[in-house]
Amino acid sequence: MTREELNKLLAINRESGHLEFKEISGQLSIFGKDETRGGKINKKSLYGYSVAIGNEGGGKLILGVKNEINSSTGMRDIVGTNAIQNVQKAEEEIYKVLGRKIGIENVVTETGTVQIVHIPSHPTGAPFKFHGVHLMRNGEHLEEMDNGTLARILNETRSDFSAQVNGAASFEDLDSNAIKILKKKWVEKSKNKDLEILGEQEILEKLLLITKDGITNACILLVGKSDAIAKLIPCSEIFLEWRLEAAKSDYDLREIFRGPYILVQDRIWDFVNSKNTRVPFKQGFFEQDIWAYDENSVREAALNAFAHREYHNKTDPIYIRISPEKISIKSTGGFLPGVNAENALDVEGQWRNRRLMEVLGIVGLVERAGIGLDRIYRATISQGKGLPDFEGTTGEYVVLNVPAKIKDLNFVYYLQKIQAETQIKIDTVKDFIELEYIREHGKARDKERLSLFLSSGIVEKFGKGKGVKFVLAKSFYEFIDNRSEYTRKKWLSKEQQKQVLLNYLDQHGKGRMKDFKNLFEDKISNTQIFILLDELRKDEIVHFEGKRRSPKGFWKRVDRSR
C-alpha cells in the first residue's frame, strides 16, 4: 500500500464494520487467551477483530493511528506501532482457527510504522467464531452477535427466493393488466416486435417467471393480484408516510400499497409527487426547475428497496418516509456480505433476489450493473442537495436517505456554467462526489480527479504539507458574488484577522465594511473590524478612499510602487 492510499484510509470520516482504527502501542495478543491468568479471554485481540470484521463482510484493521481525525489535517495522526511482532506467525495462527488467510502489511512512514490487517469475509452461510462465540462490532466494543444478524448470515446459503416456485399460486392469481404492461416494457426495451404476438403465459414463461414447475415468487411480486400477494407473500407491502417534520414519531399521512409492483411503482410516485415543492432555477440562459423530490431518484430508490429486500420469513413492509428534509427508504435484510455504505456504489452483481433482478433488467427497469444508486447520488449533488447517506442501517435493515432540501443553489449554477462554457466533462458520479467533498471539507480523496480539477482551474490548492487545502476556484465565488467566502476559505486560522483583511484586499482590490463583516461571518463587531483597519492604516499598509462613513468609500492597500 502506498502512502497516498494510506492517507485516503486515514481521512475516512468514520469507522464501520469494515474499517477499524486502533492506536495500540504495545503488543496485540493473537488469540486473546491468557493462560497465565486462568485462560482469561480478551476479545480485543487479532483473533477477535478478525472474527468481528470478517462477520461484517471483511475489511481492514489499521494499527498505529489515532482513532479521531485531526481537524487541521483532515486525517488521523500516525503514532506508529509494533503490535504484531511476527507477521508470518500471526498469519499462520489465524489461518488455523478461521480457515481463511488474513494478510498483514507494514507501511513505514516518517512518524512510525502502520500495520494494516486485511481480513476476508466469512464463508457464505458460515459466520466466524471466536473461541466458540460469534462476534460482531458494536461501536467500540466486540460483542456476541445478535440473533437477527446471525440468522441473516446462516440464511446466505439459501437458494434464490424469487426463483422459487410458489406451490400455492395459480395463473388466476396474476393480474392481466400488470402482465400487459410488463410485456409492453419488454417490447420497448428489446425493440423485438415478435414479442407482441405472444400470449400472457408465454411472455411469463419466456421471462422464466413461470417454469415447468409452476409460478415463481418473482412472478407474484411483479404481476400478482393484490389479494394473492396478501395471501402468498404478505410482507410485500409498502407503507408511505408523510411527516411535516422528519424527527416526528407519528406520521401526518399514511397510505399502504400492496399489489403488483409493475402497477404500484406509479402509485408510489403519485403519492410522493403530491407533496412536491419547486424551486425556480434561472440565471442567464440557465432555466429549469429543481424539485424537492426528483422523480427518477424516487423511482430508483423504491425499486432498489423492492428488488434487494429480504422476503423469506419476514413480516416487515418497506417503509418510504417523506418529509420536507428528505425521503427515507427502509427495507429488510441488511447489506449483503461484502457490501457496505462505503462501497455500495462500486459493488456489482450482489443480488439477493437474482431472478427478480434479471427480469427487471430484461424489461428495462434496472441496468445489469446495478439499480441506479449512482444516478441518485448524481441528482442530489447536481441539484445542490448534498450527499445521500445510509444512516440508520443495521444488520437487519438498509436505510437510504435521499436529501430533499437545497443546500447550495449556487453550486448548481456553477456546475452548469463549467459544462456549458468549457470542454470539461463532469458526468460521472465520482466527479460529482469529489467536487462536493472538496466544497464541504476542503480536502480531496481522489488524486486523479483532483489533478484534472486543478489543471482545469475548477479547484485551487493552497497551504503546504499537512496544512494543504483545496477550494473551488475563485471564479466560482465571483460567479455567485460572494468573494468574502473565497477569502475566508483561503485561510486556515481566523486568528490572523489582519492578514485576512489584507488577503481580501489583495485578491479583490478594495473592500467595504459590509464585505469585511461577511468575511468574518459576523463573529466580530464593526468596531473590532474598524480597529484592525485603523491599525493597518497607522502602519501605512491600507488607506480609506472617500469621505468618512460614506457608503461609496472603500478601503484599499497602500500603493508602495510609487
Image (cartoon, rainbow, N blue to C red):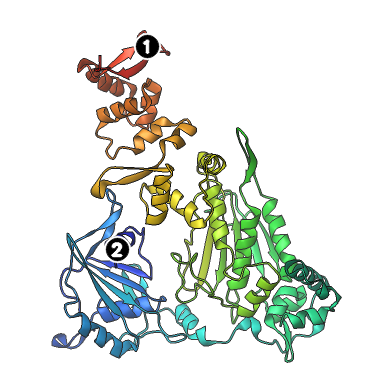
Q: Which three-letter amino acid code belongs to the residue tagged 2?
A: Leu
Residue 556 seen in the figure: yes
User: Which residue corresponds to the image point at 69% horizontal and 67% vertical from the top-left?
Assistant: 364
Q: Nearer the viewer, residue 341 or 9?
A: 9
Quarter of the N terminus within the rendering: bottom left
Q: Which mark is residue 100?
A: none
Q: Residues within 10 Å of mark 1 (few under 14, many from 20)?
A: few
Q: Which mark is residue 6?
A: 2
Mark 2 to mark 1 CA distance (whole Å) = 54 Å
The residue at which mark 1 appears reads as 549
- The answer to which quarter of the image holds residue 183 is bottom right
Residue 420: x and y, percent?
57, 41
Q: Which three-letter amino acid code belongs to the residue tagged 1?
A: Arg
Residue 17: x and y, percent?
38, 70
User: Which residue corresponds to the image point at 45% horizontal and 35% vertical from the top-left?
Assistant: 475
- The answer to which quarter of the image holds residue 50 is bottom left
What element does badge 2 sit on? helix
User: Which residue corresponds to the image point at 69% horizontal and 52% vertical from the top-left?
Assistant: 273
Left or right: residue 432 compared with residue 319: left
Q: Residues within 10 Å of mark 2 (few under 14, many from 20)?
A: some
Give the vertical position of 11 relative to 346 (above or below): above
Q: Nearer the viewer, residue 316 or 414?
A: 414
Q: Nearer the viewer, residue 147 or 121?
A: 121
Left or right: residue 170 compared with residue 477: right
Residue 368: x and y, percent?
60, 71
